[in-house]
Image (tube, rainbow, N blue to C red):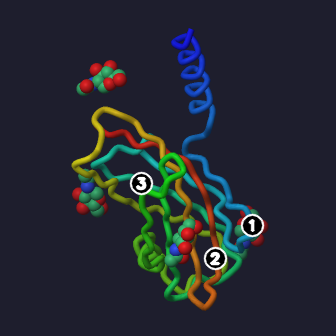
Amino acid sequence: MNKFFAIIIFLTLVTFTTSFPLSGFTQCTGTFPNEVTSFSFSPNPIIAGQNVTYTISVDNTVTVQHGATFNITTYKQQQVIFNVVSDYCKNLIEGGYECPLEPGNYTFVFSDYMMTTPYDPKNTTIEFDSRTEIANPGDPKTILTCIERKYSVYYP
Ligand SMILES: *[C@@H]1O[C@H](CO)[C@@H](O)[C@H](O)[C@H]1NC(C)=O
Ligand SMILES: *[C@@H]1O[C@H](CO)[C@@H](O)[C@H](O)[C@H]1NC(C)=O
Ligand SMILES: *[C@@H]1O[C@H](CO)[C@@H](O)[C@H](O)[C@H]1NC(C)=O
Ligand SMILES: *[C@@H]1O[C@H](CO)[C@@H](O)[C@H](O)[C@H]1NC(C)=O
């Protein structure tokens, strides 16, 4: 009987995850002036030890200033597993733009290496959640953009 339920739950999860747009994202609760209008990445699932190419379009109504931060928090089953805060203007340079970035619609393409650790599982796909905030400097800083997304990483 337990096995039967386990199979039903498993099938429900499979149906749910395949119908959920894996390269999808949602805006965080709240109002942010620079909205992400599209987001995709390749390969999907991401493969540990390989590069991932992200394509992101934003509709900026506010200027991104020097010193803007890019804050990515990654969660696995609701637990924070890491948080990286970097210089957003450096990412923009990689994408062919620079700070200050005036209001407008922009599409950025950039690559990022999906790191591996000695603790990685083998031949397994793991689902993560992440929250990305882009903020202009200041006290308090102004959050310009905030998205949340779910993605899978395959560990070969
Ligand atoms: C990932 O991209 C970087 C920079 O574009 C490149 O130097 C590196 O060789 C790539 N790594 C792999 C595993 O493709
Ligand atoms: C980064 O984002 C997380 C999650 O929203 C938040 O708890 C943390 O305070 C932020 N860090 C910085 C330096 O803004
Ligand atoms: C960006 O595009 C949206 C719709 O695609 C448009 O409403 C908006 O005015 C554009 N923003 C700028 C600054 O051009
Ligand atoms: C990886 O896992 C799948 C199913 O879980 C299995 O069919 C396959 O043989 C495994 N591959 C390797 C190289 O272990």
Q: Does label 2 or label 3 sit earlier along the sequence?
A: 3
Q: Does label 1 or label 2 sit earlier along the sequence?
A: 1
- Assess disc 2: are there few (<14), some (14-19) or many (≥20) residues with their C-alpha within 10 Å of its C-alpha: some
Q: Position of residue 6 (x, y in %)?
A: 54, 18
Residue at the extreme front of the image, as rendered: 2
Q: Quadrant of ligand 4?
A: top left
* Residue 124 falls in image quadrant: top left
Q: Position of residue 9 (x, y in %)?
A: 59, 22
Q: Position of residue 111 (x, y in %)?
A: 38, 59
From the viewer's perspective, tell me whether residue 121 is left or right of residue 32.
left
- Specify the quadrant that holds the C terminus: top left
> Judging from the image, what secondary structure is the residue with disc 2 in?
strand
- Assess disc 1: are there few (<14), some (14-19) or many (≥20) residues with their C-alpha within 10 Å of its C-alpha: few
The residue type indicated by label 2 comes to Ile
The residue type indicated by label 3 comes to Thr
Residue position marked by numbered label 1 in the rendering: 30
Residue at 71%, 71% (x, y): give it. 32
In the picture, the disc for residue 53 is 3
Residue at 54%, 50% (x, y): give it. 78
Residue position marked by numbered label 2 in the rendering: 143
- Assess disc 3: are there few (<14), some (14-19) or many (≥20) residues with their C-alpha within 10 Å of its C-alpha: some
Q: Nearer the viewer, residue 84 or 77?
A: 77
In contact (CB < 8 Å): disc 1 and disc 2: yes
Residue at 48%, 49% (x, y): give it. 76
- Specify the quadrant that holds the N terminus: top right
In contact (CB < 8 Å): disc 1 and disc 3: no
Q: Residues under labels 1 and 3: Cα distance?
A: 28 Å
Q: Nearer the viewer, residue 13 or 53?
A: 13
